[in-house]
Amino acid sequence: MDLEQLETKINLQFKDRNLLQSALTHRSYLNENRRWPLPHNERLEFLGDAVLELITTEHLYRKFPNPEGELTNLRSALVNYKMLSDIASELELERHILLSRGEAKDTGRARQVILANALEALIGAIYLDSGFASAKIFVDSFVLNKLSAVVSSGKVLDPKSKFQELTQEKIGVTPHYKVLNEWGPDHNKQFEVGVFVGEKQVATGTGPSKQEAEIAAAENGLKVSDF
């Protein structure tokens, strides 16, 4: 795996190359390579997610005078797993991620989630290796540069917000969400979430995170609602 090539692409040289390697190691790889000396990337992903959210939130706060709800929608449109997986693809992270043979064959949403998680892990690794300023430069260069396109696309209002606006306008009720089921291994969890208006379950949705499942439930709620 040519990590120097990736470092050139992101314009950053790691002091601790093991951090970069670990950020690109999927849990499934360790199942087939028990002697691999480095941990998988889930802890770095956890850290990177928080760093990404802080940098993005501060940028949006300073750039836009919009109320909190609109800023939240804008942030969601900018850092959802689909957007992050697209950015990871642009950086060709897939060429560098260590996966099990089975995971390497997966396509579609599962692969997108792996790529998005690896990008967040990379941000976490940059933060640990070079500090907040370097992480901010990376996020500015590869994530926040998508902001203009997100705003101009008109897709900032996410399905959950659209469904909430609809229910509040039509019947004066705010919908709520409940996890109905979850399954799968820790590295590939799936969630089923129901969206409720009052006591009535309007629709369900599934996804690789509670947030994505809620979005799917809201999308389905918009399709079937007859308020």
Image (spheres, helix red, strand yellow):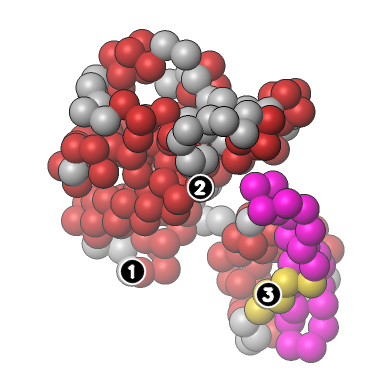
- Residue at 69 percent across and 59 percent down: it is 213
Q: Which residue, as the protein is rendered here, is positioned at the far front?
A: 35
Q: Is residue 198 magenta?
A: yes
| Circle nearer the N terminus (3, 1) | 1
The residue that mark 2 highlights is 42
Spot occupied by residue 192 in the image (x, y as percentages of width and height)? 77, 63
Q: Residue at x 21, y 28 (%)?
A: 15
Is 67 rendered above or below residue 91? below
Q: Which mark is residue 67?
A: 1
**Inter-mark Cα distance, 3 to 2:** 26 Å
221 or 186, nearer to the observer: 186
Horizontal side of 88 relative to 214 (left or right) equals: left
Q: Are marks 2 and 1 in contact (CB under 8 Å)?
A: no
Label drawn at residue 177: 3
Indicate which disc, 2 or 1, sits on the residue closer to the N terminus: 2
Q: Residue 95 vs residue 152: left or right?
A: right
Amino acid type at image mark 3: Tyr
In the picture, measured across the screen, residue 91 lies left or right of residue 67, that is right
Which quadrant of the figure has residue 62?
bottom left
Disc 1 residue type (three-letter): Pro
* Badge nearest the viewer, 3 or 2: 2
**Badge 3 or badge 2: first in the primary sequence:** 2
Write the start and end of the magenta stretch as one range. 181-205
Query: What x and y, as percent, mark residue 182?
Result: 77, 63
31 inside magenta stretch: no
Q: Is residue 68 left or right of residue 130?
A: right
